[in-house]
Image: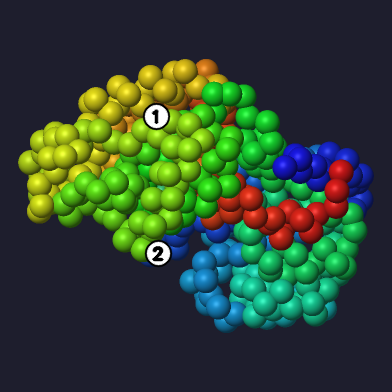
Amino acid sequence: MAAIKKLSIKQLKLKGKKVFLRLDLNVPLSENGAITDQTRILAALPTIKYIIDQGGHLIISSHLGRPAGKVQPNLSLKPVAHALSSHLGKEVPLAPHYSLGEKVLQMVNSLQKGDVLLLENLRFYKGETQNDPEFAQALAAFGDVYVNDAFGVSHRAHASVCGITQFIKPCAAGFLMGKEIEHLSRLISKPARPFIALLGGAKVSDKLGIIENLMEKFDALLIGGGMAYTFLMAKGFEVGRSIVEKDKLDTTSSIIKSTDIRGIKLELTEDHVIARELKDAAQTTVVNTSDIPEDWLALDIGPRTIELFIKEIMNAKTILWNGPMGVFEIEAFRAGTEAVGRAVAESGAVSVVCGGDTAAAVNSLGLAHKMTHISTGGGAALEFLEGEELPGIAALDDA
Ligand code: ADP
Ligand code: MG
């Protein structure tokens, strides 16, 4: 697959233009409505600041949660407007939700160079997720140019991501979107070899598509975390009460066969940190694959597997990491993810981290700054690596 090249915000003249910017400001909120993690806001700041510095009139839009086409006051973007105001050192007003007609158009038209307006939660309107052309056209009326920096929703054909691009030109990628496309498409098109995949986590089905699509590119597959147990069961091992996706055993078996035929190294967890219960104070012990007792759970990779994986990691030139090696949220099962994470950080390889939980693990270990790229789009990144064309990227103008 050739690398994807899309028009960049850098190529646009923004001075005096109304810039309609789609962001992913879908931040987690506490029960009293406080933002508990600002990552998505911080990730959007370079594009926001650039548009302000260029003298654009900035109209920002985003979704928040799943209000399902109805106004839900607890899913208002008000806290986001406050956070943006404080990050930018200027007032960012929030447009009223009750209509996207005259009132909002007036607010848009009274913007001056460098001013910012935030539209209310796009998913208060049914037309957003339905990709309704009328709604898309109403959104398009607010801008002279369109910039999409919401990589995390680019796998959704929604009005503010797709439909709108029919009614406004040019349509460009923001800096975050550009970075995501660059790093992820390099994995697909020309990864430096050896290229290894380090896979784990709990959702096996999410990850099998990536293996199938990139199989021929990988030199080695290292599989730990919960994912290993579907593979081990497919190979005929008893895995106790460890997590298994039984409906994926066939796919897993055929992946095992393909790696064999193609001579791709497949390394599965060899020793396991097991416990009777998934809790911090649980008594743990380490066993080999053939010795997992019936009523025990395997919850982390053991020391021999850590060593084996580190050897492969240190030898790699490109690493795709998706899925923690164990239940890292609990101290007793964190060692595998921590050791392997440190090795990826120190390897000197191009390192691309995908998946919400893997990103959280890397952040909590303080290793984020050592990774080449940490994708902000969970589902979107997975679909991209599965070889799907993402509608929100396809809709942007080619470079
Ligand atoms: P990501 O969000 O990075 O794609 P997943 O959602 O697939 O990753 O999986 C993350 C979860 O997997 C973590 O919450 C972690 O506790 C869990 N996990 C990792 N190893 C195991 C295991 N051996 N058994 C059960 N759960 C596991
Ligand atoms: Mg997850």
Tell me the element at label 2.
Answer: loop
Q: Residue 110 lies in what quarter of the image?
A: bottom right
- Rate crowding at label 2 as few (under 14), some (14 to 19) or many (20 or more) other CA atoms within 10 Å: few
Label total for image = 2
Quarter occupied by the C terminus: top right
Image position of 78 (left or right of 313) = right
Question: Where 123 sits versus 222, above or below?
Answer: below
Q: Percent position (x, y) of residue 190? A: 68, 31
Q: Type of residue at label 2?
A: Asn
Q: Quadrant of the rendered structure where residue 245 is?
A: bottom left
Q: Residue furthest left?
A: 283
Q: Counting residues from the N terminus, which is met first, the one under dot 2 or under dot 1?
A: 2
Q: How is the image coloured?
A: rainbow
Depicted 234 relative to depicted 343: above or below: below
User: For this rendering, which residue is in front, 362 or 237?
Assistant: 237
Q: Which mark is residue 32?
A: 2
Residue labelled with disc 1? 341
**Rendering coords of residue 74 (x, y %):** 48, 71
- Check disc 1 and report its element: helix, strand or loop: helix
